Image (cartoon, helix red, strand yellow):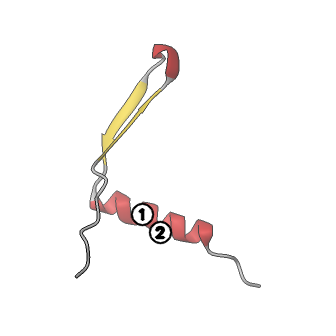
Amino acid sequence: MKADRPILRKVSINLPFGIGGAEWEVDSTQRRAAWALYVEAVMPIKA
């Protein structure tokens, strides 16, 4: 049986020294786009 994978729902980034930060929720469209970019980045280019 396949185990359930955790799904990233919220991302939070904070800068040091109280400069600021950002927080956003990821939807399925953004997750698919990020996966497509990741695949493009790690696949070697064949000539």
Of residue 40 and residue 18, the one placed in the foreground of this image is: 18
Neighbour tally class for label 2: few under 14, some 14-19, many 20 plus, Cα within 10 Å: few
Q: Residue at x 48, y 17 (%)?
A: 19
Give the numbered dot on residue 33: 1
Q: Looking at the rendering, in which quadrant would you find the C terminus?
A: bottom right
Q: Residue furthest bottom?
A: 47
For label 2, the residue is 36
Count of labels shown? 2
Of residue 6 and residue 45, the one placed in the foreground of this image is: 6
Label 1, secondary structure: give it: helix
Q: Residue at x 62, y 75 (%)?
A: 43
Amino acid on which the number 1 mark rests in the picture: Ala
Label 2, label 1: how many angstroms apart (C-alpha)?
Answer: 5 Å
Residue 33 in the image, given as x and y percentages of width and height: 42, 63
- In the image, residue 32 above or below residue 15: below
Label 2, secondary structure: give it: helix
For this view, does 27 lie left or right of residue 21? left
Residue 12 in the image, given as x and y percentages of width and height: 37, 36
**Do the residues under discs 2 and 1 have CB atoms within 8 angstroms?**
yes
